[in-house]
Amino acid sequence: MFIPCDRGGGSAAPDFKGFTLLMPAVSVGNVGQLAIDLVISTLDMTKVGYFYTDCLVPMVGNNPYATAEENSTELSINAEVYSLPSKKLVVLQIRSPFIKNKYRPFCETLLSWVKSSKCARVVLLSSSHAYQRDDEQLLGTPLRYLLTPDLEEAVGGRMQELNWKEMEKVAAYPGISDTDKVLHIPGGGITKLLFTESCSKGIQMAVLLKFCSEGDNIPDAFVLVNYLNEWLQLIKSEVNPSSQWKIPSSWRLLFGNGLPPALF
Amino acid sequence: EVVVAPSRAGLDEEEEAREETPEDREIRREIEKKREIDVLWTWRSGGCGEEPLVCSRFIVAIGRNAAAFLSSFILDSVCWEVVGVVKLWNEWCRTSSTTNVLPTDSFCLFYRLISDPTVLLCQCSCYVAEDQQFQWLEKVFGSMQKKGLQVTILSTCPVADYKTQESTLTLASPFLRALKTKEFQEQICCPLLEQPNIVRDLPAA
């Protein structure tokens, strides 16, 4: 699945032992993916490889994080891996939707890669349909977190300190009062599957998600990435954290081209 | 009526749902089998242990426009011979294993240059669905010896999809753009595709 970039000189495959894997779920508003774009772009991360997978719709383009003519012509595809060894951070970016019936195969392959590359933990950025919130969730923060039992032991205390809110479980059968409570993440794509699989495989995983709707999700991405930053401290956040994130050049023209002058 | 807005993220809510029953699995397998791609090379007699096709240049034209370009300017029955065909079915088209096709048919044919049999050409005017693109790739390239292979992919996109600062109304079209791997060192005849434009489907695969 993971194909390392050929950096020439017969360099060995990158070593992710003990690293934190940060990745998005393809979810409502693409918020996780936008947040990951901000991380890669701001930290100027180096591409170290890609995933060769039949689970995602193929796409290709030139470098989405280009800052100048010189670095604008590197090809970029639908699932790529970036790394920043100084922060023991490895980031997976996913740029296209899943192909039907491929959620499970992708999750299985991904988790077995996480295990074989000995990543310490996985942080999944995701989102969920805002319109599916219940009355209580409509109030207060739209941000939630989840931790697998293995990670709960390690960092549960930190979440308490940060005053973060855990994602609530909902009744399996709404309207009927005594039923079991289950985890339900509508619009979250592979989030729930990846989380439940990680729980059962003993993988340390955290999910950070925001309730949102489709639209201009750039502000949602900023909120989510600042939420992540409260915990992982990827950038300094004293002054105004939002202004420290660098928007990639590929975010241009998100809502269409210029208008024809003849229209007016 | 409250209508749920479709998500740009292409979310498939049913995937979240229950585990597959044996009947579901059976149905899914049947559909997968129906959507399987067959690559038939006419110069092979079948059976396993076949030698891979030695190929130095592979030109692939995807979509009706690109296929028509090859038909109009490159292909002829004197210099090129048919060496293969792809048989597939999806909701949009069905191809057959016949090599005698009309321009209006959906087909995917392979031709070889008689004077240099390592030059291969593919005309793919049929639509290869998302779940078939990877299979197409593996089965076609799987039959080839890839060392020193140069691949050129020709395709077209609507001008309206091109993202640019100005309006596409005033853009002089048609126009060319290219994407290339860093291994490709030759001169390219047109500018490279600017962000945020991307290519998807079979050409991307």
Image: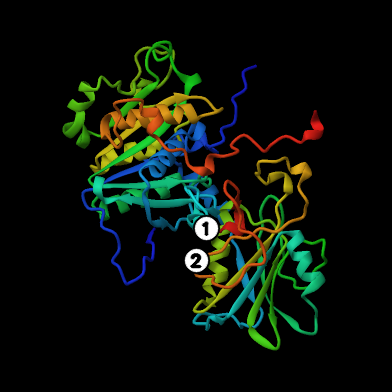
Residue B151 image-quadrant placement? bottom right
Q: Disc 2 to disc 1, how far (Cα)?
A: 8 Å
Amino acid under disc 2: Lys
Residue A27, placed above or below residue A57: above
Q: Is residue B49 left or right of residue A36?
A: right
Q: Who's the residue at 53% across and 47% down the image?
A: A99
Q: Nearer the viewer, residue A173 or B3?
A: B3
Residue A188, placed above or below residue A63: above
- Which numbered tag is attached to residue A23? none
Q: Quadrant of the C terminus of chain B?
A: bottom right
- Label 2 marks a residue whose chain is B
- Label 1 marks a residue whose chain is A
User: Would you say residue B57 is visible in this rendering?
Assistant: yes
The residue indicated by pointer 2 is B182
How was the colour assigned to the protein in this rendering?
A: rainbow
Amino acid under disc 1: Thr
The residue indicated by pointer 1 is A73
Q: Who's the residue at 17% across and 26% down the image?
A: A157
Mark 2–mark 1 CB contact (< 8 Å)? yes
